[in-house]
Amino acid sequence: TGFPIAKIAAKLAVGYTLDELDNDITQVTPASFEPTIDYVVTKIPRFAFEKFPGAEPLLTTAMKSVGEAMAIGRTFHESVQKTLCSLETGLTGFDEVEIDGVGEGTPLAEVKAAVTKALSLRTPDRLRVAAQAMRHGLSDDEIAAVTAYDPWFLARIREIVDEEARLREEGLPRSEAELRRLKMMGFSDARLATLTARTETSVRAERQRFNVRPVFKRIDTCAAEFEAQTPYMYSTYEADAMGFTECEARPSARNKVVILGGGPNRIGQGIEFDYCCCHACFALSDAGYETIMVNCNPETVSTDYDTSDRLYFEPLTLENVLEILRVEQENGTLKGVIVQFGGQTPLKLANALHDAGIPILGTSPDAIDLAEDRERFQQLLMKLELKQPVNGLARSPREAEEVAKRIGYPLVIRPSYVLGGRAMEIVRDDAHLQRYISEAVHVSGENPVLLDSYLTGAVEVDVDAISDGIDVHVAGVMEHIEEAGVHSGDSACALPPYSLSPETVDLLKEQTRALALGLNVVGLMNVQFAIKDGEIFVLEVNPRASRTVPFVAKAVGSPIAGLAARVMAGEPLANLPVKSPDISHIAVKEAVMPFNRFPGVDTILGPEMRSTGEVMGLDRSFSRAFLKAQLGAGTALPTQGTVFVSVKDSDKDELMLEAARIMTGLGFKLVATGGTASFLTENGIAATRVNKVYEGRPDIVDLMKDGGVQVVFNTTEGAQSIADSREIRALALSGKIPYFTTAAGSRAAALAMQNRLDGELEVMALQELQA
């Protein structure tokens, strides 16, 4: 509606009355003037069931969505189809849905039964299943009887489905009026291309030939009764029945920068990227530019009407972005478009925008590609004399087998161009590879899959930096608490590093600088390193904002996203107030997991990201900062009781012994499985042996069910061990028992519990620490 509910509510809470407050958008009506809208808004949640194998993809009374998209149009048809495009799940509208049991030649009665069964399931795709049911001949009444959807909505969806059938039969219309009518119904160029067996480019060319283009309307809270002073806009197609179509965009004559947002929140691309977009807006506004934000996520601050100078609430597709740029270029000077701050979403548009003659600010699309192209990136590392794990790439299952034979197991396998470790896995043998490769190749499409040697037990390090192409400023070096192989978004990490030597940190900074200059990065860059046996390996480089930027900015007290935006707009780094990452306090980031929403899902961490949020603990010592982070994430560490310890052979080392000694010193009793109990006893630590799940009753699961375990230190390796310990993890989750799956995490938890004896945790304001 454009009505700032929280802002007005806060003012009412301190004593204002509605009639005393102005409406920011019209600036002439009071806040007591209720919003009137002359458009339709549709919101659709975004789900991530693919991240949780084993979870039933069904909607219940427990919320399971991880984000949402919203779109605005003049009709329901337009609004809902724009929202489907905004979800960024590959949809171009009411795309077809495959229904189990329905194929070519399936008898009509069986088709109806299969479709009815699919409709009865409350899946995230149910709206599209309803459209598919119409294509299979079910009536609106039959669909409504199964789904309880309101017949009005079904009638609108049927109008879309009928139009699609006509397009399949007759092809793209040859008249301006017909093409405009289709666009008014919300059909994207990409959907029209699919339905008429053409390319999106040819549909766009045809549309432009007839001059069928969108106009932009303003959200004004008053259905055009008063003039809107705030440029908060959405696109729509109008029929020129009145002789002309009215566009309310009114682009200014200023120097402008367009910032593309991240779209709906999802695992791997969330609010961290919106933080970067907002700070880029603030910094560029301060530098005298007009900032123009494009995004479609109602949950974000970037889609507040007062964050940027101009806001377009639109899907982040090439079609929509090009139309916005066309209008904005009608007046003033477009300095360029920033694609670095919205995660993978805008990066995917970089090449197409560049090809359309739009200036891309910051790192060039070619450099972005170089960092993702395994062969080109390998050549750069050789030139810079930097190491990376032994690796290879494969375009077919046979190639994958050959590469795996050459590298040796275990290995990490992933598709190109993914965010959040989508379809990324640690593969330990041939059978696992065979089972997995079909999914990875499918996810990758035309891109090859990447196979890397898995550096068992390595320490992973994240480095964020800003470069202007000449100077490089390392903003922060973070040491992961979980070992390499756990996705960086799921790993706890500390800034500054808590166990690395100053010499190693200096080497990491040097290598980061070399990479930034070698890639010719302009703006933000993130590098992930692994350190094994004193050697540094480059895992990957992302020449864009990373999800650690807000954490680094707040830990160090430096507005790094804003500084990067100014660098991208042409200011040299030497002229900007950069701040040293060397701080006297410690910041620990901990991931927040949604496993309690997905019963039946294994909670073990791996290279595919699953966290939906994060917290930060700040203190003057590592262990107390870690304790604050655990408390912030909702993990209550006990003060007494029993610790269950079961660790893989490679973790039977000093780290685990230190954790065990600390726990016994705190008065905790230790119980352990056979091999671990022997290891602890041999090293002078008392531990009671307990049966594994398959070794006979009573076993560890019985002990946990009886409330006999308060903390779990359990590290596993190999498919069988992971499967055997799954029930332990499930019980720990349901019983809210703190559970640590790595040796480093177990040691950090033990230190945190020990440190709590030193007195109450001190509460410090961020400003105090950064003074």
Image (spheres, grey):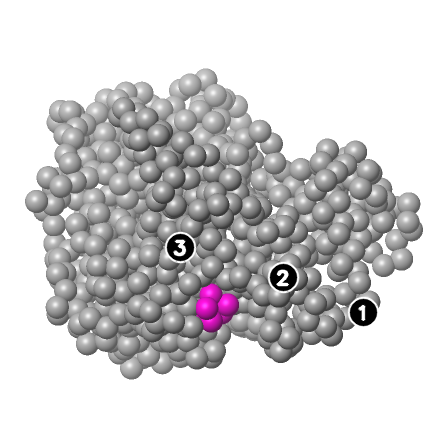
Label 2 Cα neighbours within 10 Å, binned few <14 / some 14-19 / many ≥20: few
Q: Nearer the viewer, residue 107 or 704?
A: 107
On residue 242, which mark appears? 2
Q: Nearer the viewer, residue 458 or 632?
A: 632
User: Residue 424: image x %, image y %?
Assistant: 48, 57
The segment highlighted magenta reads: 322-327
Q: Which residue is mark 1?
A: 170
Asked if residue 721 shows in the view, the reply is no
Q: Quadrant of residue 571?
A: bottom left
Q: Quadrant of residue 200?
A: bottom right
On residue 421, which mark appears? none
Instruction: Decide whether residue 11 is among the magenta residues.
Output: no
Check disc 3 and report its element: helix, strand or loop.
loop
Q: Which residue is mark 3?
A: 231
Query: What amino acid is labelled 2 in the image?
Result: Met
User: Residue 55: image x %, image y %?
Assistant: 58, 40
